[in-house]
Structure formats: C-alpha cells, structure tokens
Image (cartoon, rainbow, N blue to C red):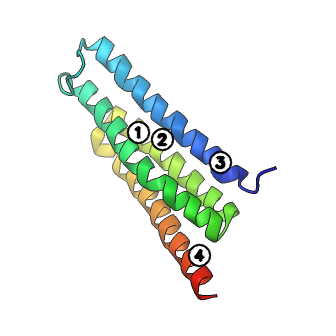
Amino acid sequence: MTAYPGPSLLTLASSLLLFACSAYVGRCRMKFAIKAPATSGHPQFEIAYRIQMNTLENTVAFLPVLWVFALNLSSFWATLLGGGWLLARVWYALAYARDPKTRGAGFGLSMLCFAALGLGGAWGVLRGLLG
C-alpha cells in the first residue's frame, strides 16, 4: 500500500486533464478544418490550442512542487492544495473556452495553490536539511 494515494491520484487526474485538453484541440481541428501542423485559424481553435498549451505549461511546473511538498511536508495537504490546483485549472479551461476574458479567477486560484505547494515544499526541504 502506498503512503501517497492523494498525490498519486492527482498525478493521474492531471494526465487526464491534459488528455481532455488535447481532445478538445483535436475536435476543434476537425470542426474548423484546421490541418496540422497549423496552430492558427478559427478563433475557437486558437482558444482551444492556448488552453492546451497553458495547461501543459502549468502541469509541468505543478507536478514537481506537488511531489516535493508531499514527500517533504505533508501528503494530506499536498492532496488538498493539489486538488485545488486541479479544480482551478478545470475552471480556467472551461471559462477560457466560454469567454477568454473570464479565465482570470481560475488562473489566479491555480497560481495560489501552486505558490503554496512551492513555498511549502521548499520549507519542507529546508527543514529536513537543517533538522
């Protein structure tokens, strides 16, 4: 039995979010007849593409801080903060797809969760080094 079921589940859920974003881009490519490798065309395709790229960029930064926090401070709090990040990223993606001007709240919340994980993880590592 693993001691990190929450962070493990969030890692899998993050992969599913990335897959869902990729699928949305693919659907928009088909719907608006945008042939690869083009990354521009219909505005809704460009929105879908930006959602995918922004989510990918954020996930690459999120996963290390999630695991550093979980391993060095608290798996429980990593799960809560990471779950907040994940929900905020879903909120961001849905809001962005509906109206790009409304994506700010989801983005802001995800950045707060990310910052808490990063700072907490750094504290956990420093505490381990000094203690």
Q: Residues within 10 Å of mark 1 (few under 14, many from 20)?
A: many
Element carrying mark 1? helix
- Cβ atoms at labels 2 and 4 below 8 Å apart: no
- For marks 1 and 4 on the same chain, the one whose residue lies earlier in the sequence: 1
Where residue 90 is drawn, which disc sits there?
Answer: 2
Q: Quadrant of the C terminus?
A: bottom right
Residue contact between numbered discs 4 and 3, judged by CB atoms under 8 Å: no
Q: Which residue is mark 3?
A: 8
Q: Are marks 1 and 2 in contact (CB under 8 Å)?
A: yes
The residue lying at 55 percent from left, 58 percent from top is 66
User: Mark 3 or mark 4, which is nearer the start of the sequence?
Assistant: 3
- Relative to 125, residue 84 above or below: above
Front residue (pair 127, 22): 127
Of circles 3 and 1, the one toward us is: 3
Real-space CA distance between mark 1 and mark 2, rounded to the nearest whole angstrom: 5 Å
Can residue 106 be seen from the camera position used here?
no
In three-dimensional space, the C-alpha distance between marks 3 and 1, rounded to whole angstroms, equals 22 Å
Where is residue 16 drawn, in percent x and y?
54, 34
Residue 19, visible in the rendered structure: yes
Which label lies toward us, 1 or 4? 4
N-terminal of the pair, mark 3 or mark 2, is 3
Label 3 residue SS: helix
Q: Say which amino acid is labelled 3.
A: Ser
Q: Which residue is the site of mark 4?
A: 124
Q: Are the two marked residues, 1 and 4, in contact with CB atoms closer than 8 angstroms?
A: no
Taking the spot 62% from the left edge, 80% from the top edge, the residue there is 128
The mark that comes first in sequence, 2 or 4, is 2
As drawn, 30 above or below 112: above
Instruction: Give the label on residue 93, or none.
Output: 1
Return the x and y of residue 117 as percentages of the image width and height: 52, 65
| Residue 17 pos. (x, y %) | 50, 36
- In the rendered structure, find residue 38 and report the number of the disc placed on it: none
